[in-house]
Amino acid sequence: MTDKTIDDPEIEEVDLWVSGTEEAEWDVYSTDEGAQKMRLEETGARLTEQLGSVVTDDYDLDDIITEDERMIINMGPQHPSTHGVLRLQLELEGEMIRRSKCVIGYLHTGMEKTAETLTFLQGPTNVTRMDYLAPLHNELCFSLAVERLLDIEVPPRAEVIRILMTELNRIASHLVAMATNGMDIGALSIMTYGFREREQILAFFEKTTGLRLNHNYIRPGGVAADLPPGWRADVSDICDTITGRLTDYEDMLKENPIWVGRTRGVGVITAEECRAYGITGPTLRSAGVPWDLRKAFPYSGIENYEFEVPVGEHGDVYDRYRVRIEEIIQSVGIVRQAADAMPKGDFRIDDRKVTPPPRHRIDESMEALIHHFKIFTEGFRVPAGETYVAIESPRGELGCYLVADGTGKPWRMHTRAPSFYNLQALPIMMADSVVADTIATIASLDPVMGDVDR
Amino acid sequence: MSEDLRERFPEAEWIDSHDQDVVRIAPDQLLEFGNVVHEAGFEVLADVTAVDWYRTRTPRFDVVVNLLSMQHRRRLRILVGVPDGDPVVPSLVPIWPGANFGEREVYDMFGITFDGHPDLTRILMPDDWEGYPLRKDFEVGAVPVQFKASHQVN
């Protein structure tokens, strides 16, 4: 039996750190851990940023409120309605959001660094994994940048195939946006509808490219393979199904009082704020700006197709949903035009520097075999230079900044991810609204975390 | 418009890069240049990034700013050379608030500091990460493999 007591000087004092008991002068947010966290008290530019009132100060919550009534809560990164691993820090006053901050990087895999170790031919396998809901747009953007540095033009059939595939991809992506937006608010039927129609498009992608996602189909110099036999029937089937079922979606959501009540006037952003923050895509168009890169800086012959740029009026969640639905209709039109206009000819460029020799040549010619081997192991050289190419992805301006130094691998490949820049809109949209609206707001922005973190 | 700019910034170097307007200016002129082109109609900052020219060029870094003018349907790219020893450029957040995330990413990946940025912290990497991953002297696969000494079933 020991007779040591707490007062016994022989007992060593244990150096324990207890959360929340820091010394008075110690600023925990300035240390290495927690620098990205939202501070209890913010001042100056950081405060206006988090209140979302940098451009227009439309904040009207009562600021004279005691500290006890404020609370900072974490939402995510493991939250089902953050569409991946987005983490939000929200300062609440009761049910109202006072300020907010997004913390990202939970899905960062260093794809831009990886791109520097891959050849230009392997590049699309890497970029296709960034925005996993619009992989073909990523591939197209990268391929266009490489082609501009190489100064080559792809054959007409390849261009039309590219438009056909990317527009189908846009429909699939918007269907997911609509489905998940509905699911987050509680409209579960629309979720099953959206994914059902998307499945049909993905089945066609699988038939054409071999994979449902991450296709590596659009490559520098054209596309990887020609369209499969029977593609015309498949595509027209998809178009008919989507146009037929759009009425179902309209019946379900367009004038549904619960849906309209949850989305009208929620998550509002103005055109001026969109421009200041570089926010593009359906979010910008919902604020009434008819800006679409397919019209402004046409690529892959998209200027030869007839389509309109739908715009909203109020810049709220409902308008963003409407813009996406209208864009599905426009994209179906483009897909039909592309299928009708499909020219005959090569699906990839007939330039042996970029394109491997055809399969039958490998069987009969040693040189062709060596050539095939070299192009897939070493790749092709791209002349030194730099360029920025941007296309309209379902989420906005998707850009690729590519720097080549004359070797077979890019010196630097940077992707201007639309979701990354669009996330900056969240504090603007969410400040001064209730917690329940955050979910509708995030879903309407349609961020893809693979695209944000890359 | 570009004639006017040429006169106002005689030291700026204008480059035609595959039919795109590119201008290279000194870091101390960046803010002034930014204000002028913002007034001239480049209301959107599309992207901020950087390139590391390790052992190939001096100054070592290029900060790349891609601007977009929706009213004129034009693009303009600004290149700013940044030396290795003291990598500091003025922040463009006061002109284009949307530069916030882009500059944080460049700071995170290249260690370039943006003077006047409201919240210059790491954005993609953990707060306590050492080094700047997109620098050319940051090795790929430098992270030690965990649990490699664990028990293996034959």
Image (cartoon, coloured by chain):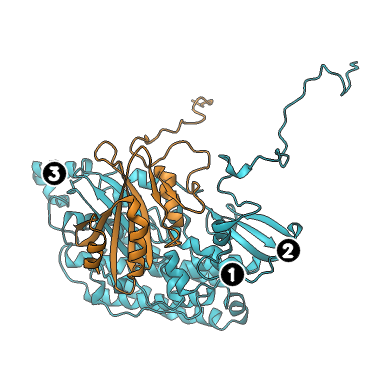
Chain colours: A cyan, B orange
Quadrant hosting residue A292 = bottom left
Q: Does the CB distance between marks 3 and 1 fall below 8 Å?
A: no
Q: Chain of mark 1?
A: A
Q: Nearer the viewer, residue A412 or B68?
A: B68
Q: Amino acid at mark 1?
A: Leu
Instruction: Tell me the crowding category of disc 1: few under 14, some 14 to 19, or many 20 or more residues within 10 angstroms, Cα based.
Output: some
Image coordinates for residue A121, horizontal then vertical, percent: 25, 49
Image coordinates for residue A96, horizontal then vertical, percent: 67, 66
Q: Amino acid at mark 2?
A: Ile
Cα distance in 3D space between marks 2 and 1 = 39 Å
Q: Chain of mark 3?
A: A
Instruction: Tell me the crowding category of disc 2: few under 14, some 14 to 19, or many 20 or more residues within 10 angstroms, Cα based.
Output: few
Q: Amino acid at mark 3?
A: His
Q: Chain of mark 2?
A: A
Sequence-earlier tag: 3 or 1? 1
Q: Nearer the viewer, residue B54 or A395?
A: B54
Instruction: Tell me the crowding category of disc 3: few under 14, some 14 to 19, or many 20 or more residues within 10 angstroms, Cα based.
Output: some
Q: Which residue is mark 3?
A: A371
The answer to whether dots 3 and 1 both sit on one chain is yes
Sequence-earlier tag: 3 or 2? 2
Q: Which mark is residue A65?
A: 2
Q: Nearer the viewer, residue A430 or A132?
A: A430
Helix or strand or loop: what does disc 1 sit on? helix
Q: Which residue is mark 1?
A: A188
Q: Residue at x 41, y 68 (%)?
A: A280
Helix or strand or loop: what does disc 2 sit on? loop
Which mark is in front, 2 or 1? 2
Which mark is in front, 3 or 2? 2
Image coordinates for residue A214, horizontal then vertical, percent: 37, 54
Residue A35 sits above or below residue A347 on the image: above
Helix or strand or loop: what does disc 3 sit on? helix
